[in-house]
Amino acid sequence: MEALKDVRILDMTHVQAGPTCSQLLAWMGADVIKFENPQGDATRGQLRDVPGADSLYFTMLNCNKRSITVNMKTAEGKAVFIDLLKKCDIIMENFGPGVLDRFGFTWEKIHEINPRIVMGSIKGFGSSGPYADFKAYENVAQAMGGAMSTTGMPDGPPFVTGAQIGDSGTGLHLAIGLLAALHQAARTGQGQYVEVAMMDGVMNLCRVKFRDHQRLTRGDLPEYSVPTYKGMGDVPRAGNDSGGGQLGNAIHCKPHGANDWLYVVVQEAVWAAIAKRIGPDIGMPDLATDPHFATIDERRKNQQLMWTLINKFAEKYTKREFMAILNPLDVPCGPIMSTEDLATDEHIRGREMYVELDHPQRGKWWNIGMPIKLSASPARIERSPLLGEHTDEVLKEVLGYDEARIGALKQAGAFSTPPKKKA
Ligand SMILES: CC(C)(COP(=O)(O)OP(=O)(O)OC[C@H]1O[C@@H](n2cnc3c(N)ncnc32)[C@H](O)[C@@H]1OP(=O)(O)O)[C@@H](O)C(=O)NCCC(=O)NCCS
C-alpha cells in the first residue's frame, strides 16, 4: 500500500518549486489534485519541444496528479474551492506574495473553513521581513541565499549551480514540513501553516559555508586551495575544492573533453596508496615518503603541487580507466557524468532513476525517477495530466456534484477563462 494513500492534496502550486513537492507526495501515494488557473500552469507552454504538447518542464514535475481548472475570479469558482478545501488534508501554493489573500483566502480563513487542513506555502523570502513582497525565481534565490557568492572560480564571477537548489530544494524542504504538520494534525485535529522561503532553503543548503564564515574570524581555512586569512570576512569561491575535511578536486583525463574529469578525494587514509601507485609513473618513486606530502597539513599546504602530480598521472587514462585504478585502492572518486552519461547509465536505469513514460500529446518521454525508495510502498510513476483532464471526475467523485450542477457551474464560467470583451 502507498504510504500516503489516504492523503488528499489541493495543489495550487505552479512552475517548479511547489510542483516538485507535490509530485514527491503523489509518488508516495497522495491524491494530488492540481488546481489550475483555466489558462493552466504557465510551464505547460514554456520551452516547448513538441508543438501543441505540454512541455517537458511541465510533464517532468507534475506526474501522478489529477488536473482540475477553476477560475478563482468567479464566485462559483471560489465556491468549488471552498468545497475542495473541506475534502482535503493539505492545501499548498507558491503564488507571488498576496495572491491568495487577494482571492479572499488568508490562512486564518482557510483554517476556519477546515481546521484540520495543513497549508504549505512557498515564497521567495517568506511572509515577514523587508524582502517579503518580492517575487523570486531559482537564480534569485541562489543569489540571495549564499550559493552564488560561494560558487565558481576564485578569480571569476559568481556562478549558479546546475542543481535547482532554489526551486526543487525548497520543494523538498516543504515536503518535510508538510509531513510533520500532517503528523501533528493527526494527533491534535488542528492543521497549521507551513512556510518555506526559497532564500532560507538555499541558505540551509549552504550551511558549511557559514561554518567557514565563522572559522574565518579565528584563522585561515587551510583546506581551501585559495588564500584565506583571519578576518577576511567573505567566504571565497573555491572552484572544485572539496568543501569538507578531506582534500578533493576534479582531475582532467583523456581525451580531455568537456566532461573528461574524475573527481578525486584524497582522503587521509588513502594518500599512501595513491602515492605508491602514481609515484613511479610520474618519475617520483618516493612520493609516498616525500615530506612535502607526508601529513595532511603538508598536503593542504602543497595541494596545488599534489593536484598537478595527480593530473600528470591521469593524462594517459580516461575518467573510467582512472576510476578503475583508484577504486581498488579505496579512493573515494567519481567521474563527472554528463547528462548523456546518466541517461544511458546502467546503474541509474537499474535504480529506476530515469524512467520512460507515454503521453497522449508527446508520445514517449523520460522522467527522473523517485529518489526516495520506500521498501513497502515503491513509487509507481504515471504521466502528468492534461489541462483540466480530471475536472468532471474530481467534481463528481470528490465533491459529489451531479451532472446538472456541473453543467450550471460550467455555464457560469467557474472552470474557464471569460471570453475577451469586444472593444
Ligand atoms: C513564480 C512567480 C515569480 C511567478 O509570478 P507570476 O507569474 O506573476 O504569478 P503570481 O503567482 O504572482 O500570480 C498568479 C496570477 O494568476 C492568478 N491565478 C492563479 N490561479 C488562478 C485561478 N485558479 N483562477 C484565476 N486566477 C488565478 C492570480 O490571481 C495571479 O493574478 P493577479 O496577480 O492578478 O492576482 C511567483 O509566483 C512567485 O514569486 N512565487 C513564489 C516563489 C516561487 O515559488 N518561485 C519559484 C517558482 S519555480
Image (cartoon, rainbow, N blue to C red):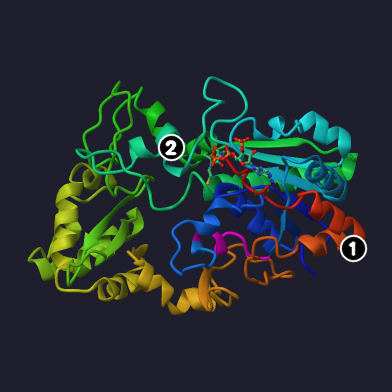
Q: Is residue 75 left or right of residue 423?
A: right
Q: Is residue 370 left or right of residue 116?
A: left
Asked if the residues shown at circle 2 and circle 1 are in contact, with their CB atoms under 8 angstroms apart, the answer is no
Point out which mark residue 403 bears: 1
In the orientation shown, which residue stands out farthest toward the front? Answer: 423
Residue at 83 percent across and 47 percent down: it is 80
Q: Quadrant of residue 381?
A: bottom right
Residue 115 in sight from this viewpoint: no
Residue 4 picture location, percent across and down: 77, 59
Q: Main secondary structure of the magenta part?
A: loop
Which quadrant, please, contains the N terminus? bottom right
Residue 186 picture location, percent across and down: 87, 46
Amino acid beneath label 2 = Val
63 is within the stretch colored magenta: yes
Q: Residues within 10 Å of mark 1 (few under 14, many from 20)?
A: few
Residue at 51 percent across and 35 percent down: it is 199
Residue at 72 percent across and 40 percent down: it is 73
Q: Is residue 215 left or right of residue 194?
A: left
Q: From the viewer's perspective, is residue 125 above or below residue 31? A: above
Residue 291 picture location, percent across and down: 16, 49
- Of label 2 and label 1, which has the lower sequence position? 2
Q: Nearer the viewer, mark 2 or mark 1?
A: 1
Residue 156 picture location, percent across and down: 21, 40
- Please state which of residues 369 and 415 is positioned toward the viewer in this rendering: 415
Magenta segment boundaries in residue numbering = 57-64
Q: Label 2, on which residue?
A: 140
Amino acid beneath label 1 = Glu
Q: From the viewer's perspective, is residue 317 above or below residue 414? A: below
**Secondary element at image label 2:** helix
Q: From the viewer's perspective, is residue 220 above or below residue 267? A: above
Which quadrant, please, contains the C terminus? top right
Ligand 1 found in image quarter: top right
